[in-house]
Image (tube, rainbow, N blue to C red):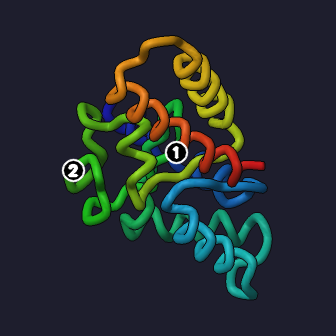
């Protein structure tokens, strides 16, 4: 049973990295690091789909690629960069949230998560149309809108 779970997790990780490496637009603080991987895939050393698969497999075997997807993006997890203060192996599922992830160097967003950010942006805009919102709440929601807007602009 454990091997089946590990295989499923590895397959999910492979598929996630395939999506990230072939996405037309990527947002998040981890996008720069992903771009380096994309350049490696595009270089003479790793051209083509088979080479991309070989690179992903080599990175997984070396323990470099750790991917934790969620409804608002991907965590290309590296503990030393972790805003959520995860373990050696994975992000902290208790502290992980869209605002914290958006501030993290491990965070990546593709068009598959665009609807999450659009909905969040629209809900926050609607909230700000209300009357008599406490100043602290207004500032908090305005900061959320700013983050959502930045992510959405990069996904266009």
* x and y, in percent, of residue 112 in the image: 68, 37
- Where disc 1 sits, the SS reads helix
- Where disc 2 sits, the SS reads loop
Classify mark 2: residues with Cα within 10 Å, few (<14), some (14-19) or many (20+): some
Q: Which residue is mark 1?
A: 147
Q: Which quadrant is home to the N terminus? A: top left
Q: Residue furthest front?
A: 132
Q: Is residue 7 above or below residue 136?
A: below
Q: Residue furthest top?
A: 131
Mark 2 vs mark 1, CA separation in Å: 21 Å
Residue 116 falls in image quadrant: top right
Q: Is residue 135 visible?
A: yes
Q: Which residue is mark 2?
A: 85
Give the residue drawn at x 34%, y 61%: 78
Task: Please state if 75 lies on the left or on the right of 53 as rendered.
Answer: left
**Nearer to the camera, 84 or 20:** 84
* x and y, in percent, of residue 14 in the image: 57, 51
Give the residue drawn at x 64%, y 79%: 40
* x and y, in percent, of residue 57 in the image: 54, 64
Task: Please state if 102 lies on the left or on the right of 2 as rendered.
Answer: right
- Are discs 2 and 1 less than 8 Å apart at CB? no
Give the residue drawn at x 47%, y 52%: 107
* x and y, in percent, of residue 4 in the image: 42, 33
Q: Is residue 35 above or below residue 67?
A: below
Q: Is residue 45 above or below residue 26?
A: below
**Nearer to the camera, 131 or 104:** 131
Q: Which mark is residue 124?
A: none
**Nearer to the camera, 150 or 26:** 150
Give the residue drawn at x 57%, y 63%: 31
Classify mark 1: residues with Cα within 10 Å, few (<14), some (14-19) or many (20+): some
Q: Is residue 69 above or below residue 154?
A: above
């Amino acid at each position: 049973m454990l091997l089946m779970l590990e295989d499923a997790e590895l397959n999910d990780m492979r598929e996630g990295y395939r999506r990230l490496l072939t996405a037309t637009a990527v947002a998040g603080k981890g996008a720069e690091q992903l771009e380096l991987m994309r350049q490696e895939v595009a270089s003479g050393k790793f051209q083509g789909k088979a080479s991309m698969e070989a690179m992903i497999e080599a990175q997984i075997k070396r323990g470099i690629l750790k991917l934790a997807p969620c409804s608002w993006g991907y965590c290309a997890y590296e503990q030393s960069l972790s805003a959520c203060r995860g373990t050696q192996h994975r992000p902290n599922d208790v502290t992980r949230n869209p605002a914290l992830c958006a501030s993290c160097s491990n965070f990546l967003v593709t068009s598959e998560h665009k609807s999450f950010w659009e909905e969040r942006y629209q809900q926050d805009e609607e909230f700000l149309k209300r009357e008599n919102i406490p100043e602290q709440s207004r500032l908090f929601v305005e900061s959320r809108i700013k983050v959502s807007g930045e992510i959405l602009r990069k996904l266009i």
